Amino acid sequence: MRLAVIGTGYVGLTTGVCLAEIGHTVICVDNDKKKISLLKKNKVPIYEPGLEKILKKNVKSRRLSFAGNIKDAIKKSEVIFICVGTPPREDGSADLSYIENVAEEIAKNMDNYKLIVDKSTVPVETGEKVEITIKRNLKKNISFDVASNPEFLREGSAVYDTFNPDRVVIGVSSKRAEDILKKVYRPLKTQILVTDIKSAEIIKHASNSFLATKISFINAVANICERCGADVEKVAEGMGLDKRIGRSFLNAGIGFGGFCFPKDLEAFLWISKKLGYNFELLKNVKEINEKQKQHLVKKIEDTLWVIKGKTIGILGLAFKPNTDDMRFAPSIDIINSLQSEGARIKAYDSKAKERAKEILENVIYCSNPYEAAKGSDCLAILTEWDEVKKIDLKKIKKLMKHPIIIDGRNVFDPDKMKKMGFLYKSIGR
Ligand code: UDX
């Protein structure tokens, strides 16, 4: 099938590349000239394991191409996926101006039937607005359908998630749209759930908010565990063995970050309010998440006493492993707090370093974990990279000024750390 993907961020690029890999002819469009020129040179502008390899393969077999101009892509494609950003506005609502622009462009440039599929995360009722916008801007009477097809891929495992989804959700208002989207996804051999457009839109917001709720719930439980001497890891294991609960997303730590959970939570709160419902629970989820970052700062304060003049080594800056994404990373608030108290920060993250430099000032960026440990009063683990899990702890201990590790991601076994002579503190145990 001939497909266009508008927007080449994490979702758009991965979707475009993977749809080409399963046999479709895909044009990926972006108005960012720099991005398109990189992509045309077979270079992926983000760090996402496995993506570049499949991109190269499909460009070579001519199933995948990149364009800066939307017009041609619309004319050549039967299905158009909208994957542009929906960044948060000051009040928490999603900025839908990019979606509106694309809808207008589609309307102005289409000359036969098109299925316009929204993949960007949007508040419920956006599908309706897209349909109105297209109708308003159409030059002649051409039939079209709008559909919602939310994306659930995770950064860092985006390619795997796209090929192995738990489900594909398609929100449609016509049999024609349903049949086309089923044909697009048939090669994935996965369960396809067909709903109306509004339900599909809510499935995305509700899923992300529910996962965020699981994380805040376990972080709240971790606080209880710390106060009474229980072990949150064991608690999560025991809870997770109940199939109705499940073990995933019950990892206590410094809270969730990234460009999806914080933003989608806000947007869901906003649209709930707009629809007349006060979603109190989500406010608590947000609040617990904010406190969890400061909880780690407090642990460092309690251990080091005076922060001013102390050197703190940071292991991991990205909001989670296997990505270079720094957006809403808990490390930002934690480092800012420590710096405001006068700490000197040395940080190591092999992938997120360049993006971190754009956000965090006055940080000494190290080229390996040992450099970050050297002479430090304390090490704080903020991202559970494999590289961090495998560090040579004996070497670390020798290099540090004091063998103190505050682990925000529960990477190491507290007993082992104690035996090795570390003053080791983690979350909820
Ligand atoms: C998320 C959703 O998982 C995905 O379905 C959606 O499409 C986009 O948003 P992503 O933001 O890439 O994906 O990362 P995810 O793996 O879900 O982690 C989000 C944050 O939660 C990270 O900061 C992570 O460290 C944190 N987290 C996750 C926890 O603190 N504990 C957990 O148990 C799981």
Image (cartoon, rainbow, N blue to C red):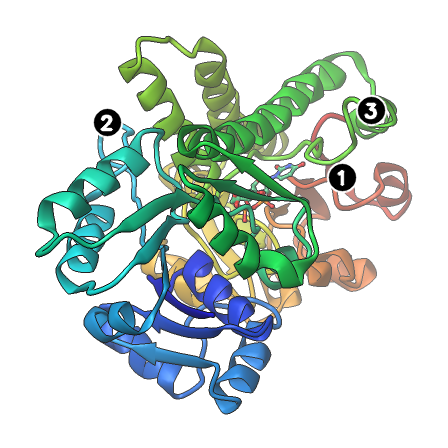
Residue linked to disc 1:
423
Residue 343 in percent (x, y) is at 45, 44
Looking at the rendered structure, the kind of residue marked 1 is Leu
Q: Secondary structure at mark 3?
A: loop
> Dot 3: within a 10 Å radius of its alpha carbon, few (fewer than 14), some, or many (20 or more) residues?
some
Q: CA distance from mark 3 to mark 2?
A: 38 Å
Residue 208 in percent (x, y) is at 53, 33
Residue linked to disc 3:
231
> Dot 2: within a 10 Å radius of its alpha carbon, few (fewer than 14), some, or many (20 or more) residues?
few
Residue 305 in percent (x, y) is at 56, 30
Task: Name the mark nearer the viewer: 3 or 2.
Answer: 2
Q: Quadrant of residue 428?
A: top right
Task: Name the mark nearer the viewer: 2 or 1.
Answer: 2
Q: Is residue 343 above or below residue 113?
A: above
Which badge, 2 or 1, is on the more N-terminal residue?
Answer: 2
Which badge, 1 or 3, is on the more N-terminal residue?
Answer: 3
Q: Is residue 145 left or right of residue 426?
A: left
Q: Secondary structure at mark 2?
A: loop
Q: Is residue 407 left or right of residue 17?
A: right
Q: In which quadrant will I find the C terminus?
A: top right
Q: Are marks 3 and 2 in contact (CB under 8 Å)?
A: no
Residue linked to disc 2:
91
Residue at image position (55%, 62%) is 349
* Residue 246 shows in this picture: yes
Residue at image position (35%, 54%) is 115
Residue 54 in percent (x, y) is at 58, 78
Q: CA distance from mark 2 to mark 1?
A: 42 Å
Residue at image position (72%, 60%) is 386
Q: Secondary structure at mark 1?
A: strand
